[in-house]
């Protein structure tokens, strides 16, 4: 079974949070300024909306192992 691809999206509108009911059947709460993982299909439906932006990718730097 393959894993559904996800995208991270951030809401930056005028409310503290919004709850969206997608045509896919998913219900997602978007706290203002907090990245939220959604399916690629749901992210695509938000692409043209000015209050939703792709969240920056998390960058992690591996820590050197102590030995």
Image (cartoon, rainbow, N blue to C red):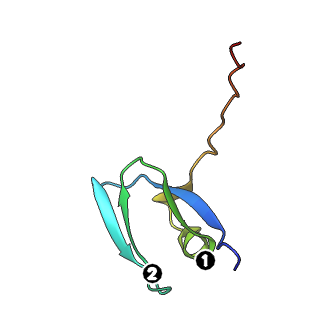
| Alpha-carbon span between mark 2 and mark 1 | 9 Å
Kindly check if marks 2 and 1 are in contact, taking CB atoms under 8 A apart as contact.
yes
Q: Which mark is residue 22?
A: 2
Q: Secondary structure at mark 1?
A: helix
Q: Look at the numbered disc 2 and give the secondary structure of its residue.
A: loop
Residue in the picture at 71% in, 12% down: 67
Percent x, y of residue 10: 48, 54
Q: Residue 60 vs residue 34: left or right?
A: right
Expressed as whole percent of the image width and height from the top left, the position of residue 52 reads: 49, 59
Q: Give residue 47's quadrant in the image.
A: bottom right
User: Which residue is identified by label 1?
Assistant: 41
Question: Is residue 1 or residue 40 the one in the foreground?
Answer: 1
Q: What residue do we see at 50% from left, 85% from top?
A: 24
Tell me how many marks there are. Answer: 2
Disc number for residue 33: none
User: Where does residue 50 sit, x and y in percent of width and height?
Assistant: 50, 61
Q: What residue is drawn where x is 62% and y is 41%? A: 58
């Amino acid at each position: 079974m393959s894993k559904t691809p996800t995208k991270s999206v951030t809401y930056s509108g005028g409310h503290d949070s919004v709850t969206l009911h997608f045509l896919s059947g998913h219900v997602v709460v978007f706290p203002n300024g907090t990245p939220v993982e959604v399916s690629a299909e749901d992210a695509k439906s938000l692409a043209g909306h000015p209050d939703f932006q792709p969240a920056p990718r998390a960058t992690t730097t591996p820590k050197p192992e102590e030995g």
